[in-house]
Image (cartoon, helix red, strand yellow):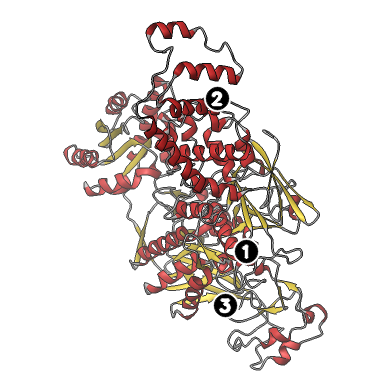
Amino acid sequence: MSRIGVFVCHCGENISRTVDVEKVAEAARGLLGVAHACDYKYMCSDPGQALLKKAVAEHRLDGVVVAACSPRMHEKTFRKATEQAGLNPFLCEMANIREHCSWVHEDRDEATAKAIDIVHMLVERVKRNRKLQPISVPVTKTSLVIGGGIAGIQAALDIADAGHRVVLVEREPSIGGHMAQLSETFPTLDCSQCIMTPKMVDVANHPNITLHTYSEVEEVDGYIGNFQVKIRKKARSVDMARCTGCGVCMAKCPQKKIPNSFDRDLGMRPAIYVPFPQAVPNVPVIDRVNCTWFKSGKCGVCQKVCGPGAVDYAQQDEFVVEQVGAIVVATGFNLYDISEKPKGSPIKGYGEFGHGKIPDVIDGMTFERLASASGPTGGKILRPSDGREPKQVVFVQCVGSRAREKGISYCSKICCMYTAKHTMLYKHKVHDGQAYVFFMDARTPGKGYDEFWRRSIEQEEAVYIRGMVSRLYQKGDKIVVMGSDIAVGIQVEIEADLVVLATAVQPRQGAELLAQKLGISYDQYNFYSEAHAKLRPVECATAGIYLAGACQGPKDIPDTVSQASAAAAKVMTLFAKDQLEREPIVAKVNERFCVGCFACKKVCAYGAIEEKEIRDRQGNLVKVVAYVNPGVCGGCGTCQATCPSKSVELDGYTDEQILAMIETL
Amino acid sequence: MKNTKMTLSARTMNLDFVRKVEKLSGTSVRRCFQCGKCSAGCPMRSFMEHPPNRVVRLLQLGQYERVLAGRSIWYCASCETCSTRCPNKVDLAAIMDALRKCSWDARGPSKESFVQLANRIFIENVRTYGRQYEMRLAAVFNVKSGQFLKDIMLGPSLLAKGKLKMFHQKNRNIHEIEKIFSRIEELRRKGGAL
């Protein structure tokens, strides 16, 4: 006969508002095998846990059911308390009468009856629970960082400085990301390159960091502490070991008119190129689509002029497999595109803003390149169409963002601040120019942010006009901006020389594909989801994978750096132990009944099923059965549902337990 | 004018005018972030076509003609509720004063209201008699504004209660008061007063 204790929580009023908790405790007391039942206002609080521990000792309990919130919330808490009371922690189960009952029902009597049923089911399950021991797995103390922007760089440096090896993978030929493209940064107006490039050099020189640029993550296998990552190193056509970065190849390349995407296609680059002069590593890449050699088999100039003989046209994509214990995802963002069918987006662009076909309507990042000292214009603000200096510049905020019609309802968070910065940069460079900003709200929550925004109005004399722009159209060499000042209630028209749109921040293209490789979840916009919005903001629900930067949601540089350091701290916490303890909720094979059909192997999402030979004493093969590697098993139970001979069972969720639970109803 | 479209450019935004107003009032219009607290507490709001916050907004956009065309600035009672409560220390009452001066200088008395007329007769009375002479104030105002019978029924009861005197009483130190007026006129000639 079991001696189970049932502990019913009020959860303040969250549960007791709709469920008569005393009645639930009363009913539980009458169940077969229940030795003790009580209720308490906050079971998770210190006195609540003390109540549980005391009851275990007093009533010599051999199982615990806590009727409270979801196990995702507090299962760990109560299992720990059970363990401290001297019981095996896996003899404690949660009956979810909050999310599954009180929060979703209104009728008190019916909700109470349902809560009693839930408790009864869990009592039957706990009766059949086995004592389990946590599984220890070794931890590979190497971390993978995906993305070499400021988030990835910060996380990599922090982890590497703690003495652990870091593998940094960057898709582009150079690390640096978006921050390397910026001119100056808010709210201090210090030069982005000046604070960014030293960090890039640190990454390249750090003995603990292995840098894979122009590479992509191909496959990810394994689990926390033991991931295997296959990285595709795209063919650079230049031998990294031999290249000295002298730049002769770039100077001699006859193809010089290729738009440089780093300069938002405003500047030109050769076919063999580094995206920008401060690139790390300073090794060029051949753009095989535009290179004459790859197009026609003629030319070969770069190979001839290369002193060290580093140019290698025959180079192929290479694959590297790295063993890592943790993964930091820092893939960053893209800017929303207003053209008719933005690439990889279900959202239609802005027809009323000319679908991106008006040459002097640019986005914020293009303006950054115009304002950057290392940009295509050498830091002069010039119109892309005719190279004249614009005297009237109109900035439009919230293009794409906060536009449900465009499928994006979130605020991109950084645009208010960078637009304020743009007005300042513009005023500093064009003294007789006038900047206008059309905005709906100015959202400046950050240290020194609101002061910065006010400064752009009060001192730099930007004219802020509250109200969204209705339409932009070309008229001669001007762009007519039609808006309205809603503070006055009058239509406003401005003939602008240049229009800068603060377009929405979106996740990187293909963010969802990477998420599928990693097995992490993402939201409707493809931003990666954190495990808990408030309390676990840098961890994924998938153990061992952490998030940093704008891949999780729009973020400015200070927030990105904070999150990257936080993710690094989480990785270091994981690496602080040699062995990792994980929950023993794994599948086990009954080898007597297993017929070796390996249907389970086909469905296992974790690759945990192995083939095991059973031999007799003489060494003759008796049969081949399935074996579940407990270190790899994710405890999902798919194999159990699939097995035709019912010989795989998941601890804590055996067929016997499930049937007993159903039978109570 | 009131609702026609605004075309903004360096030419159409008269920032010199705004700077003049800022200098006269000793306050910055750019500090205003349009929270609307001035309009929320303004006792004369319902008489104005541009509420106080919009007056500042139009100044920010250099639209002085729109501000001066309306009667808002003349209906401001200078109670200073707006200036007292402004979170940005924009002295709106002082801005209104400056705007009234600018309007007077530019186009004389407003056709939108009789406030200036009333003010002028009030001040002239003080200068002439050294104190207020209500009977004359009412009579001259009614004649000059063309509303001969305005508030005439209030007269008998005010007279009966002694609130309105038939004949004026002259201040003994009238020459001292004349000195004040002369000094202000002198200052005004030099541009030191509104």
Element type where label 1 sits in the image: loop
Tell me the subunit letter for badge 2.
B
Residue A664 in percent (x, y) is at: 40, 29
Tell me the subunit letter for badge 3.
A
Say which amino acid is labelled 2: Phe
Q: Is residue A340 visible?
A: no
Residue A411 in percent (x, y) is at: 55, 47
- Total labels: the figure holds 3
- Judged left or right of residue A306, residue A176 is left
Residue with the mark numbered 3? A278
The answer to whether B158 is drawn above or below residue B84 in the figure is above
Residue with the mark numbered 2? B47
The answer to whether A655 is drawn above or below residue A183 in the figure is above
Residue at image location 51% in from the left, 25% down from the top: B121
Residue A590 in percent (x, y) is at: 44, 53
Say which amino acid is labelled 3: Gln
Residue A512, quarter of picture: bottom right
Residue with the mark numbered 1? A430
Element type where label 2 sits in the image: helix
Between residue A304 and residue A26, name the one nearer to us: A304
Q: Are marks 1 and 3 on the same chain?
A: yes
Marks 1, 2: nearer the viewer: 2
Residue B101 image label: none
